[in-house]
Image (cartoon, coloured by chain):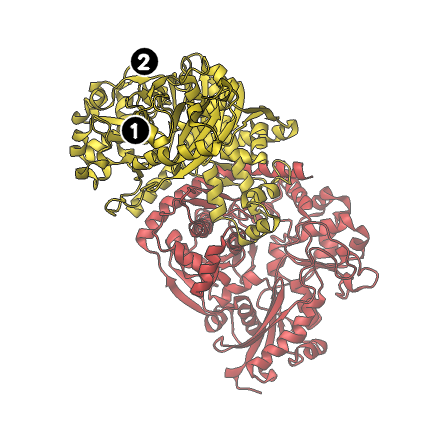
Chain colours: A yellow, B red
């Protein structure tokens, strides 16, 4: 057995396309080794692998076998690459995309693994980005508003089609036989913990954000029956189960899971978690007012506060949703890296791709460098970052993009910059909304793939007029899970000390440039005017255009 | 000498980069031959050819020697290619870009040809797209509004920086010595006729549209003095001269010009004309209510009416400005082919260029075909066609582009189509404005390079809910000039019969599709709302963005 100074935990981050395991030293958070396993089935959004059956639009399924494979391959590989004795590993924790629920039997067997159901799409995991339950979500929102459900404002006034109840209602209405066969409607985040320790606990994070658990209860029978009489007992029969607090132990590694992972049987398995929220302690952001923005294809904002407030248009507020004992707030931007990727793919001429290659830069960095050679405002444009709708604070998936100010002299990189700036303005709207709702953002911290673009982060600092601190790890979620494993295993006494010891942050890596911030204030005022005009009913043209599109393509 | 049935005229169209001569049979308008001469000096917008001196931004000069070369080369080549005896040519007429004025001596010698002035930029022709007199135009408009000048509404409320008075005032203020040496401030349209027949007549078209000649007079001394005391006698001393009506003879071909052109000395030389306006008779559009849209890089709309009205935001109304005896109205869109060219150059990925090549189509046609495979409204977008400002009916060069409705699924060809549609909506605004002002558009006729794109013209028909007739010639202006030459030479008794005999039109080549028109009505309603919001003071963001751009790049 190793010295206490060398004790480790394993954090496993289950993403959309792969799972990543990282081995972390509990004393100082050193990342000793890691490994990635790409899912075999990945995202089934066109056809069901088992049968080849075409799936309808907006579907996105997974096979939970992919998750087990991560345990069997990435975890032992990470331990091996870390060159540590597996016996030095004292705990394992996991985080997952969410809401990613699946129907299982009483013992946790996914229905899709039963031969009778393997050809039924509804037997599989509905990945977070399965968007085919929009009709159900619309009804949930309409009925909740009509009945004045007290939990609705806790979600900014909107329940998403991505979440557990919408997807569960879709299951009932489209495949009632499978619905009846479902003993538990389980988040993958909790299912994987069940596989590791043999115990089903619903983690407080996804249970609060995705399963409408507020003030100690789920939506009541009357509400559920109003959606569909057959749905009345959904919460009590299919959802409810013991709840586990973040950072606590769910159980001990089973012999079977020890065999999969190569880790010692009996080590601590932590309660499950969600990938964005678990990042907070990895970025040393466990105090009230520390907002962490995980900036990737989209952006998720998570922040703790010591009191409950209803922030207009947030994604949710959950007691213990990020850190046990604090209220965890979540907001988001639906389209950040995705908009840059779309632009580069669809709107950049060959000459610039060639110039980027010649300069030895990625096209993103090349466009950024070109665009940032001129001062703020020189491109004369403003954009709205709604190409994938607006998650916060308007909570409207039917909004769409806008670009304004282009001329015959506009260059492609200038539009790229306008899009970068639009995402920064969108972030400022969120920060200002939290501030105005009495949940002040005191510190801004960034994580995620786009921290690699320094001009983007500097833009955020200038636009927000805030110093920006940057997470010191490339694998924030997995590190966050490893921190939770250490906490659950008792290697640290509380999340603050665990985060301080094992999290990594470059504090105030960026500070606002006052002159740029002044110019951005003027552009932000324009953004805000357009945001409110097109987003708050001044001109519902975006909705009408989507209505027309639906009509003519129906 | 040929039979009367074989009599011909020569029309010469002087464009921005080249001059084109066409030989046309007066009996039936058959285009027997043509030739083009590319200017040697072309557009001097970066440096003065004579000295290499750099020119400031927004300058665009020409050397009138280029025009004479067209007479010396393109005219004889056209006659040769027509295989007609030069003695069959009974007249010549010319049309020109406008306003394209130059300073000359009393005998018509351009000041730039005098050795003393050859190095002075202000001695050269200021091409229509010379935009460096914006400051002078702004003052002309401000002073005219302040004084309530009655002529201002005849120009939609705005005098352009492209026109004679703004450019003349710039000459005075930036090179007073040359201004003093200027005996006449002459449109190239009239200068070329002067070279052909030795007589200086100001044609009623450019004199009305570009030199603020209304109700028999130019702006008065008091107004001009309010701009600059030294400018008080500009109209009477530098501008005023005998005026020639369109379609009448200016004089007879001189021996010198006969030697240049190879045409018989003494044949009729017609009064000069402007390229857009001269196209109307070539398209058999000489009756009130027939609007001709010449759709190229930009679009010019010309239409006759039998009465005078003040159409808000038109470019101008001139008595005899298109056809002697009728009131000629002009409107325009600043950015049509130019916006498609900009888009293809800057916003289309290589994959589509390659696919177009593989399909053997121009990229414009390839994108059009792709985009028009789906129904109206399927792309979900709306654009404003203001990337080069708005000429009619907002008359605001500081407006800029807008694209709204894009998503992560938007394809490049869909945006291309949204831009095509935006130009159609812009045309509809103009048509509706004329209708509302009591100058109804009864028939819509198109000419210009973009008539080659059938989906574009069909879109215009659907959006306007009007049948569209198409000019039957690829060289509308030159044909129009040839018609004017025939008229001036007496081969036809009036412009109606000349136009009927020699003009060419595919009448109602396009008719509106009712279902598409219904869908476009909905999109047009959105366009109109955005047009008024951003163009009429609802949100002056486009102006503020340009102000900021000017500030930060100053």
Q: Residue furthest right?
A: B116
Q: Classify the position of the N terminus of chain A by image quarter.
A: top left
Q: Nearer the viewer, residue A220 or B141?
A: A220
- In this rendering, the answer to whether B175 lies above or below B320 is above
Percent across and percent down for residue A346 are: 47, 48
The image quadrant of residue B551 is top right
Q: Nearer the viewer, residue B342 or B320?
A: B342
Q: Nearer the viewer, residue B438 or B422?
A: B422
Residue B157, can we see it? no
The image quadrant of residue A215 is top left
Residue B322, numbered circle: none
Circles 2 and 1, Cβ within 8 Å, touching? The answer is: no
Indicate left or right for A170 with B508 as reference: left
**Which residue is depicted at the point 38% across and 64% down?**
B509
Q: Name the residue carrying label 2.
A: A215
Indicate left or right for B199 with B415 as reference: right
Q: How many numbered marks does the figure carry? A: 2
Q: Secondary structure at mark 1?
A: helix
Do marks 2 and 1 both belong to one polypeptide chain?
A: yes
């Amino acid at each position: 057995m190793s010295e206490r100074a060398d004790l480790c935990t394993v954090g496993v981050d289950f993403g959309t396309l792969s799972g990543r395991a990282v081995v972390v030293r509990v004393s100082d958070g050193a990342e000793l080794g890691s490994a990635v396993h790409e899912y075999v089935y990945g995202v089934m959004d066109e056809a069901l692998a088992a049968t080849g059956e075409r799936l309808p639009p907006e579907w996105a399924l997974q096979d939970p076998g992919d998750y087990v494979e991560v345990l069997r391959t990435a975890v032992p590989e990470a331990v091996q690459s870390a060159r540590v004795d597996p016996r030095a590993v004292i705990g394992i924790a996991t985080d997952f995309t969410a809401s990613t629920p699946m129907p299982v039997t009483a013992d946790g067997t996914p229905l899709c693994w039963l031969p009778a159901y393997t050809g039924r799409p509804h037997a599989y995991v509905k990945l977070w980005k399965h968007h085919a339950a929009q009709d159900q979500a619309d009804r949930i929102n309409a009925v909740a508003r009509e009945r004045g459900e007290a939990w609705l404002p806790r979600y900014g006034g909107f329940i998403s089609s991505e979440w557990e109840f919408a997807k569960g209602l879709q299951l009932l209405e489209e495949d009632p036989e499978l619905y009846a066969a479902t003993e538990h409607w389980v988040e993958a985040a909790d299912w994987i913990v069940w596989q590791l320790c043999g115990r089903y606990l619903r983690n407080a994070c996804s249970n609060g954000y995705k399963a409408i658990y507020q003030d100690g209860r789920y939506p009541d029978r009357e509400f559920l029956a109003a959606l569909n009489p057959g749905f009345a007992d959904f919460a009590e029969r299919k959802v409810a189960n013991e709840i586990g607090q973040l950072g606590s132990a769910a159980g001990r590694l089973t012999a079977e899971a020890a065999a999969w992972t190569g880790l010692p049987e009996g080590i601590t398995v932590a309660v499950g978690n969600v990938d964005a929220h678990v990042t907070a302690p990895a970025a040393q952001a466990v105090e009230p007012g520390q907002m962490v923005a995980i900036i990737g294809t989209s952006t998720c904002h998570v922040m703790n506060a010591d009191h409950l407030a209803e922030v207009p248009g947030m994604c949710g507020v959950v007691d213990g949703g990020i850190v046990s004992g604090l209220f965890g707030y979540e907001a988001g931007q639906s389209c950040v890296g995705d908009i840059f990727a779309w632009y580069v793919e669809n709107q950049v001429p060959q000459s610039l791709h060639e110039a980027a290659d010649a300069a030895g830069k990625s096209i993103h960095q090349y466009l950024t460098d070109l665009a940032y050679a001129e001062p703020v405002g020189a491109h004369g444009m403003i954009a709205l970052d709604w190409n994938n709708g607006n998650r916060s604070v308007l909570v409207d998936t039917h909004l769409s993009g806008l670009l304004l100010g282009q001329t015959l002299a506009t260059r492609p990189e200038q539009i790229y910059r306008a899009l970068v700036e639009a995402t920064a303005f969108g972030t400022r709207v969120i920060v200002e909304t939290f501030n105005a709702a009495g949940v002040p953002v005191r510190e801004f911290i960034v994580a995620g793939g786009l921290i690699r673009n320094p001009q983007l982060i500097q833009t955020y600092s200038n636009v927000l007029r805030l110093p920006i601190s940057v997470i010191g790890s490339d694998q924030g979620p997995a590190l966050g899970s490893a921190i939770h494993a250490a906490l659950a295993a008792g290697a640290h006494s509380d999340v603050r000390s665990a985060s301080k010891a094992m999290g990594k942050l470059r504090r105030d890596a960026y500070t606002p440039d006052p002159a740029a911030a002044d110019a951005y204030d003027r552009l932000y005022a324009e953004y805000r005017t357009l945001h409110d005009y097109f987003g708050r009913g001044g001109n519902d043209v975006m909705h009408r255009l989507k209505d027309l599109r639906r009509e003519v393509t129906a």
